[in-house]
Image (cartoon, rainbow, N blue to C red):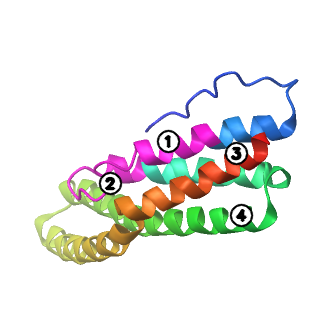
Amino acid sequence: MARAREVPGFDCDEPFAHAAARVVSVRAAEIFDYSDGVLDLEDVEPVHDMRIATRRLRAALEVFEPCFPRKRHRKALKRVKALADALGERRDRDVAIAFLEEVAEGVASNDRAALTKTIERLREEQRAANEALAPAVAPKRLKKLRRRLDKLVKAAEA
């Protein structure tokens, strides 16, 4: 799992809005850095890392809400939540598949057949969740989210 990055120059004595700008900037960058490979069904770590990054950003946006223009903040938070939801739908299937594959290794062969069918169904759901996720992580959509978050950061710095 990707660790949260340090927020460079963070100072408890600086104005709250400046801290907001620093934290949101770093947390937003994490999302975009983890977007590579997020649709790869063979390597489930990128989707996990990006989902965790969205949760960190969401928390920062909620904590620092008073520092941002209300309308811009609401729209940005809505977009981050939607992205997190799409990532979560995919991640839920990833976790279930990994768990059942591990369980399947230790059960009798007649029970393994039922688990295999369940895993196959989950893989279909995983593919569907991945297809639903694809528009949310499309470069154009991520670029738009980045611009929206950059505007929030600039507003807090002002």
Residue 63 x %, y %: 78, 49
Read off the magenta span: 25-49
Looking at the rendered image, the quarter that the N terminus falls into is top left
Location of mark 3 (residue): 154
Dividing the picture into quarters, in which one does residue 104 lie?
A: bottom left
> 113 or 61, which is in the foreground?
61
Are discs 3 and 4 less than 8 Å apart at CB? no
Location of mark 1 (residue): 30
Report the side of 154 relative to 25 (left or right): right
Q: From this viewpoint, which residue is outermost toward the front?
A: 158
Dot 3, how many residues are within 10 Å of its Cα: few (below 14), some (14-19), or many (20+)? few
Which is in the foreground here, disc 2 or disc 3?
3
Are discs 4 and 1 less than 8 Å apart at CB? no
Which is in the foreground here, disc 4 or disc 1?
4
Cα–Cα gap, marks 1 and 3: 18 Å
Whether 62 is drawn above or below 79: the answer is above
Ranked by sequence position, the earlier of labels 2 and 3 is 2
Q: Is residue 48 magenta?
A: yes
Ranked by sequence position, the earlier of labels 4 and 2 is 2
Location of mark 2 (residue): 38
Q: Secondary structure at mark 2?
A: loop
Location of mark 4 (residue): 72
Dividing the picture into quarters, in which one does residue 105 lie?
A: bottom left
